Amino acid sequence: MLSRLRHMKHLGILVAVLGGLGLAQTASTPSAWTMYQYVPSHNAVLPGPSTGYQWTFTIQGNIVGGLALANGVLYVESFDHHLYALDPTNGKVLWSFDTGQVIMTTPIVADGVVVVGSGTNAVLDDLPDKVDWGVLPPADAVYALNAQTGALLWNHVTVGEDMPSPVYTNGTIIWGNGHDVAQAANLQTGQILWRTPLQGVVTMSSANMAGGMVYMVAGMGPHSTLAFPVNTYALNPQTGAVIWKAPYGNGDCSPTVGDGLVFVEGAEQVPGSSQEVNLVDALDAQTGQLVWSYVSAPGYNDTTASNEQGIAGVYHDGILYQALPMSDQFAAFDAKTGKVLWITKTAGPIKMSAVVHQGKVYAGDGAGNLYVFDAKTGAILYERHFPAPFTPSSPVIWGDTLFIATGYHNKPEGTLYAIPLESLEASAAR
């Protein structure tokens, strides 16, 4: 285990974390954040204060991983190797933790523990029968910290990156990584409970859990010279046994679950062309059978904000809201049938899961535009331009506050914004 003293170098354990935040604020946030975008539908909308907060938090590293809000603390990670715990009302740093490597997971918070994983997509092995992505051991690891103080509880060094977010269930975290494997560990001790070989790496496909199954996507797709197929997997969370796998999705895309379906997005090159299309697929959650599929208009992968090609959708009220980054479009589908309800053109690619709240859909694109769409028609109700593109770090709504991040791909700066929802509408009216 790496020295606790080294990892606590930048640690600021504040009495305010325990007492100064106040019981009312802590009670108005979730007690746990168990997966990417909070729930299987990925609609991270939480009850909270009716008055919105406004602040910015800028650091010397891009913010690509998801956000987590639990027990009165907002957790955010960065390419500057740090996990930050912030006061969600003012953006002040309560404590920080240095992993020594890039972090791109969503912090998972449960039972007084916060878990993050480190790593990048550097290629370690690119062979006909295996692939490894990450930094040479012992660089990449999963870290478990005291959620209130940031003190290191344990770390588990892995072969391969740990960019995808785990899912938490019954005292266990489950995640895929860059070593062609899914694995489970005890949350409190880090003890590995099971490992399941997968065909290809899990790049950014965070685990999802619903109906007693864990879902993730593994494979290479267009990212590698390997001919490994891409598969969406359904695993038994107790044993790791593969319940089914289906040849759909993309290792960058976290599966979305709703209405008994698993939704994934892939990307594929158009034959004889340098252009690509997005493929949106709905699978039966129990069997993996294809229910419907959609192919987007062709276009190019704009990497201004990120390299991601398959983006997680958000399910709400019978509708799948889905970014189509290759064609710079955002779409709404009837979740059961795949019927296109609307498609709206955007100035740049949206590479984040959206959130849906009170008849509006919120998402930011790679051209630096924050959009508020009408959930029924797709009309752009209002938009606001920001000085940098929006990253794959998906937005979270807490009461009347929207949290969302911007930053250029591979540039050493990221900014997290807290924006009152009412200010978006007010600025559009002027």
Image (cartoon, rainbow, N blue to C red):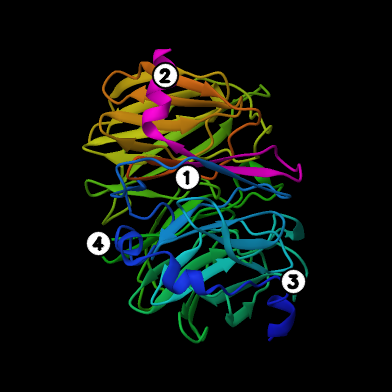
Q: Horizontally, is 342 left or right of 418 in the view?
A: left
Q: Is label 1 in contact with label 2 (beta carbons under 8 Å)?
A: no
- x 62%, y 48%: residue: 63
Instruction: Measure the alpha-carbon separation of dots 4 and 3.
Output: 35 Å
Dot in front, 2 or 4: 2
- Circle number at residue 139: 3
Residue assigned mark 1: 249
User: Which residue is at the front of the view, 325 or 421?
Assistant: 421
Can you identify the residue that label 4 sits on?
Answer: 211
Cα–Cα span, label 1 and label 3: 29 Å
Residue named by callout 2:
382
Compute the Cα span from label 3 to label 2: 44 Å
**Disc 4 versus disc 3: nearer the observer:** 3
Residue at disc 1, secondary structure: loop
User: Residue 106, position in %: x, y?
Assistant: 51, 58
Say which amino acid is labelled 2: Tyr
